[in-house]
Image: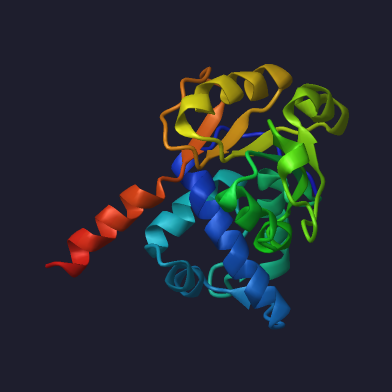
Amino acid sequence: MGVDKVDIPRKTIYRLSIYSRCLKRLHENGMKTVSSNSLAQVANVKSAQLRKDLGYFGQLGTRGLGYPVELLLDTIRDVLGGATLQPVVLVGVGNLGRALLHYDGFRKEGFEVLAAFDVKPDVIDQEGLPVPVLHDDLMIDFIAAKGVRMAILCVPAKYGQEVANVLVNAGVVGILNFSPTILQVPDQVVVTRVDLAMELESLSYFIDQ
């Protein structure tokens, strides 16, 4: 099915991804319908927030019956682009980059890492890696040829902005940034920063209370 393009806030998009995972599990368990209260509880959000988020797609639920699981899952997947595997590239094949290449959760959630790029692919042991590691000189042509719009960035901080510029110029509009630096990108490009040290620092605050 198709869904008209609507202007959905970024935080709502994040929650839709959570709803999609929950609905996928419900569907695999054979559930046909789910109430807003039940889905909200599984997704760990308030029922009012869930209904507001799903309100962007019109009237999908029925009072007293809930939401059809398969229809709602297909609708959210259509919006998130998860009907087919979305192509992704990874840049920077150090220890973290290698670990992410072995992570099979990307494909389960609708993303396919097609290739990895590094400035020195010849010195990288590629045995056992699920995708080829190519020289970063080939990155622009590869992204254009495969229609890649998302990238995972795992390069050292001093190279982060430079590589991000190349990715954006090549057509990438979404970057998952593991590089410990804040990227400057055009307004139409979305960057999600994953700072592992910051997350640990935040965690330590709560366990020290």
Q: Is residue 205 visible?
A: yes
Above or below residue 150? Residue 80 is below
Give x and y (percent) for residue 133: 77, 42
Q: How is the image coloured?
A: rainbow
The residue at the point 58 percent across, 35 percent down is 175
The residue at the point 80 percent across, 57 percent down is 127
Give x and y (percent) for residue 164: 58, 25
Above or below residue 69? Residue 196 is above
The residue at the point 57 percent across, 71 percent down is 66
> Is 203 displayed left or right of 133 in the figure?
left
Classify residue 152 by image quadrant.
top right
Classify residue 5 by image quadrant.
top right
The residue at the point 61 percent across, 33 percent down is 174
Q: Is residue 9 visible?
A: no
Q: Report the residue that reaches farthest toward the right.
A: 145
Give x and y (percent) for residue 81: 72, 45
Above or below residue 39? Residue 156 is above
For the C terminus, the image quarter is bottom left
> Is 77 displayed left or right of 11 in the figure?
right
Classify residue 104 by image quadrant.
bottom right
Q: Report the residue that reaches farthest toward the front.
A: 123
Give x and y (percent) for residue 116: 73, 41
Compare residues 109 and 105 and report the one nearer the observer.
105
Compare residues 157 and 29 and report the one nearer the observer.
157
Compare residues 204 and 129 and report the one nearer the observer.
129
Number of callouts: 0
